[in-house]
Amino acid sequence: MAKPARPIVIVTGANGGIGFGICQRLLFQFCHTNPPDALPQSFVLDDRTSDPPVEPDGLTLIMACRSVKRAEVARTKLLNLLDTYIAKLQRRPEYDGHAHAFRKNVTIDIVSLDLAMISSVFKFADEVSAKYPYISRLICNAGVASFSSIDWPACFKQMLRDPMAAVTGPQFYLQHEGEISIDGLGWVWQCNLFGHYVLYRSIHHLLLASPTSLGSRVVWMSSLEASPIFYDSDDWQLKKTEHSYESTKYQIDLICTHLDRLALQEPGPRRIRHFVTEPGVCSTNVANALVGPVLDFCKVILFYFARWFGSPHHTIDPFKAAIGAVHLSLASLAFITLFETKAQKEANITRPVKFCAQTDRWGHEHVGIMDVKDWEAHKGEAEALVGKLESLFQTFKDAEQVTMNFETASEHM
């Protein structure tokens, strides 16, 4: 009997924050014969996509990080956490030995990737293409926010008017505008969106090569703060806006939804599905430079109060915040579709959705959904934006090819 294919997963920004949480959660899930994040296991297969449940005995995890040094530290920590978790499982009376068998076939590789430099993305794709036969999951997690300061009067005003909103979707973080990348593009836009799009297109052939038993998916990380309120389609690279973070996350909602609709039109089983998720309100170091350690501690306390008073969005812990991305990586496509349909009916949602990491007041995490805001008003913009992304990608690809040809010719002179 042939061994099941082993997943090969890329996680960008994997050395810290939610990216680290995704890696840790993936490793822990695969220690189980039936990963909890893939439940319930009512596997009614999508009749157009061969994507049955599998029980792989190994995993190749590719940490795509800007700092190799920090990634190496994170890899050591991940392996130590995995070994501790397996030892804990081994003490259970029902332990079946699967985790130890899985541990023998775990590979965690580090490949340098700087999304702020398109040349780095192409280099990453070349390295991955040379080393791996396929990629089964691409998790586009890395991102930046160009915070400059806190508008304290606005902070106090929002805290007094709506304290729950203030600790869920703060409107008082001021952001830089006009920041340009080394490639001449909007810096936040390139790091959060375009760099990932170039990555997806550059390894498209590897995603298509994924065994049908594993399927092929791209998971895009959005945010609760994704909003069309500040988005200007004329400023699609977000060079002028003072709200580049919210706008670029909304663009992710749009392009992911459009790309998945295009994928569903593809004939046959070999298609690349796209899903969008958001991690809820998680405590990471994104805003640490603004608030400092004391205020950051106070902020986390407020997060716990918000959770206790009924907010489902305050995941706080990166491990819990990772449940949406990991669920979308593990669950049967049929189950994702059924869950989406049922939840939409219950929530009276008729628009496309994104999947959310949520918790109850005790901190037990689960997956929820919310609608893609104003989809009907912006679906034309989604199509146009994907067209612009593809055109820009081809421009950079052609320029990269010219550079490679020049360097090759120089070597032979």
Image (cartoon, helix red, strand yellow):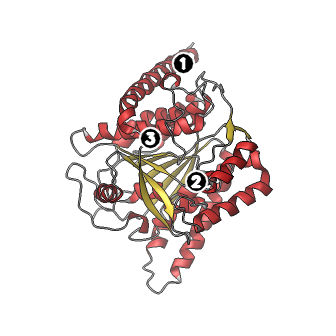
Which residue is at 44% across, 37% downward? 200
Residue underneath mark 2? 18
Q: Are marks 1 and 2 in contact (CB under 8 Å)?
A: no
Residue underneath mark 3? 253
**Residue 340's quadrant in the figure?**
bottom left
Identify residue type, mark 1.
Thr
Which residue is at 64% across, 65% downward? 305
Residue underneath mark 1? 403
Specify few, some or many for label 3: CA neighbours under 10 Å numbering under 14, 14-19, or 20 or more. Answer: many
Specify few, some or many for label 2: CA neighbours under 10 Å numbering under 14, 14-19, or 20 or more. Answer: many
Q: Nearer the viewer, residue 367 or 133?
A: 367
Residue 74 visible in image:
yes
- Asked if residue 132 lies left or right of residue 216, the reply is right
Q: Is residue 266 above or below residue 91?
A: above
Identify residue type, mark 3.
Asp
Q: Are marks 2 and 3 in contact (CB under 8 Å)?
A: no
Q: Nearer the viewer, residue 332 or 170?
A: 170
Q: Quadrant of the C terminus?
A: top right
- Element type at mark 1: helix
Q: What percent of the width, then of the height, locates residue 331? A: 36, 59
Q: Nearer the viewer, residue 141 or 339?
A: 339
Q: Number of numbered discs present? A: 3
The mark that comes first in sequence, 1 or 2, is 2
- Element type at mark 3: helix
Q: CA distance from mark 1 to mark 2?
A: 35 Å
Q: CA distance from mark 1 to mark 3?
A: 33 Å
Q: Is residue 101 above or below residue 353?
A: below
